[in-house]
Image: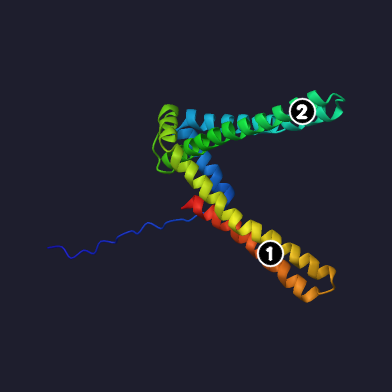
Amino acid sequence: MNNEHHKVEQKQIQYNTNPFSLIFDAFGRAFKINQNVAITVLVGGIIIYVGNQIFSNIPDLFTAIGDSSDNKDISLGLSIASVLFSLGYIVVATIIDNLWRGFTAYAGLKNARWESTTFKESYSNATKAFWKVLGISIISGLWMFAFLLPSIFVMIVGIVLLAADQTGAGTGVLISAGILFVAGLVFSQRFWIS
């Protein structure tokens, strides 16, 4: 019997905390494993951004044309068209946004696990999880507004106190408003992460 001691080499795990190198590594991995999906994410992100910039300004165009018109019927018609377009835009943008979130979340999960995926598989899973993603979006938004609205009121009180030369109290109230606002943002993002 041999009494040799075997050295067990423990593999040191290197933690990378640099966000830029983490993003660079993730994109490199995405283009190695899921090239078509990675290209879709990049191009789709650009298309969604440009589409939002174009379509979100159309109601302002309707309003500008209606304001410059002397005819009240045209102004009323353009106002109604602006409201209808805005409502339709909100519905379509919500659907696209939640499908996009599901698509990118599924593709990102597969990428993090070093597994390949296809466009069809990612889209299929995004449509299956549509209502879950929509629910998370709504609850996340409610968390943010639960803290955002009170922070606005507290901020107004702080400004009134500052205007009344109550600098100590006004400063404390404004700091509280900032904390409420940041808490709303943190809780809404924390809910998305979980």
Q: Is residue 56 left or right of residue 20?
A: right
Q: Is residue 100 left or right of residue 76?
A: left
Q: Is residue 150 left or right of residue 129?
A: right
Q: Which of the pair 112/46 is nearer the observer?
A: 46
- Nearer to us of marks 2 and 1 is 2
Q: Residue at x 77, y 76 (%)?
A: 168
Residue 37 in the image, given as x and y percentages of width and height: 48, 31
Q: Quadrant of residue 147?
A: bottom right
Task: Say which element carries label 2.
Answer: helix
98 is higher (above) or lower (below) than 170:
above
As shown in the figure, which amino acid type bears the numbered disc 1? Answer: Ala
Report if residue 50 is visible in the image. Answer: no
> Which residue is disc 1 drawn over?
177
The residue most toward the front is 73
Residue 123 in the image, given as x and y percentages of width and height: 45, 30
Q: Residues within 10 Å of mark 2 (few under 14, many from 20)?
A: some
> Where's the N terminus, which quadrant?
bottom left
> Which residue is disc 2 drawn over?
76
170 is higher (above) or lower (below) than 40:
below
